[in-house]
Image (spheres, rainbow, N blue to C red):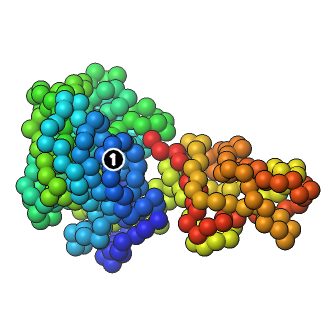
Amino acid sequence: MTKARTNASASPAVGRNMVINGAMNVAQRSASVTGLGGASAYYTLDRWKLVSLSTAGRLTMSQTADGPNGISANCLKLDCTTADASIAAGEILLLRQGMEGQNVQRIGKGVAGAKQITVSFYVKASAAFTFGVELEDTDNSRQITKLFATTTDWVRHSFVIAADEDDGSSAFADDNAESLRVSFILHAGSNFTSGTLNTASFANTTNANRVPGIDSFYSSTDNNFFLTGVQMEVGPVATEFEQEDFGTTLAKCQRYYQKWLSDSVGDSVMTAAAISDVAFIGDYFLKTSMRSVPTMGTSGTYKARLKTNDRAITGQPSINRATTENVQIFATIATDNDESGFAGFLKTDDDDAFLEFIAEL
């Protein structure tokens, strides 16, 4: 996990902002990843997914200590490393944050009394571009897009989104699944640009109407894009960007992703016990309750420490069973050493091993 700089002017959070990690402060996975654009995934900054379809363009995505003074010390940076001047119809590149339905109920969307919302953000780029910010109701296939212009200086944009009462039948589901997406669309082919921009209010989604009129981030390897201070709040006014304590933001991010990272060879992951001569099992307690039962990813090598001995394990540790708060991790000891019943711990065998627990939308 990285944190580029600390913003000394931070003030207490008041919970207006429905965007998590809008200040781009938390990057548990990595501070920078190169060669992106061939697949869609979470790579660097928490809660910000890079979505890329069918494009030959490539980029570096990073957390950069270049945010606007008094707003955030950090920003998300995209650097075009391979241009894509021939845009196929199905291409698209965007940055997305998905939101749980139970976290956006305050909007009252789709029913009588639905509220206006305001989206605001700070942006700059290496040149003047026109890009799009889209709100997408994934429960009911409805969306709206606003275009915005970049300059080489930080500029705050804000857009008021009309209340969407629809016919009273398109409310957000009140659960932990994805209901609303905020996306910054930076490159798209004719499948997404050949229609009429839907900018007035939420309407049923037609792909061709999503981002007519945008430029392409992939037009040149000189192109850079910077984003921070992203906020979505109820009401028709863009209030001052909400400064949130770093620990509060980190805990919110850990609902979706947590990482245990080794600092040196021999670090202990968890206590465990040999329940047979080869089966080694223990409980890893998650830092906070996760959105759903997580999957686990691993990197590096591990050993079982039993009595005064280090025992090699076969393959990687895996999940035996899990809840949203606890993961029981299983490993197979490579050689039967008749140590059944002894307690010990799972330890690393290199200095950059990690376990990751994933419950992303």
Residue 334 horizontal side relative to residue 134, left or right:
right
| Residue 341 placement (x, y as % from top left) | 91, 56
Q: Residue at x 61, y 67 (%)?
A: 350
From the image, tell me which residue sits under label 1.
Answer: 50
Across the whole image, how many numbered discs are drawn on residues?
1
Q: Where, by quadrant of the figure, is residue 33 drawn?
A: bottom left
Q: Residue at x 57, y 50 (%)?
A: 297
Q: Examine the rendered structure and indicate whether residue 142 appears above or below residue 347.
A: above
Q: Is residue 335 visible?
A: yes
Q: Between residues 4 and 33, which one lies in front from this camera angle?
A: 33
Q: Is residue 288 visible?
A: no
- Residue occupying the far front of the picture: 335
Q: Residue at x 36, y 71 (%)?
A: 4
Q: Residues within 10 Å of mark 1 (few under 14, many from 20)?
A: many
Residue 246 horizontal side relative to residue 140, left or right:
right
| Residue 38 placement (x, y as % from top left) | 33, 43
At label 1, which amino acid type do we have?
Answer: Leu
| Residue 150 placement (x, y as % from top left) | 11, 55
Q: Between residues 222 and 322, which one lies in front from this camera angle?
A: 222
Q: Where, by quadrant of the figure, is residue 361 drawn?
A: top left
Q: Examine the rendered structure and indicate whether residue 228 appears above or below residue 105.
A: below
Q: Between residues 169 and 208, which one lies in front from this camera angle?
A: 208
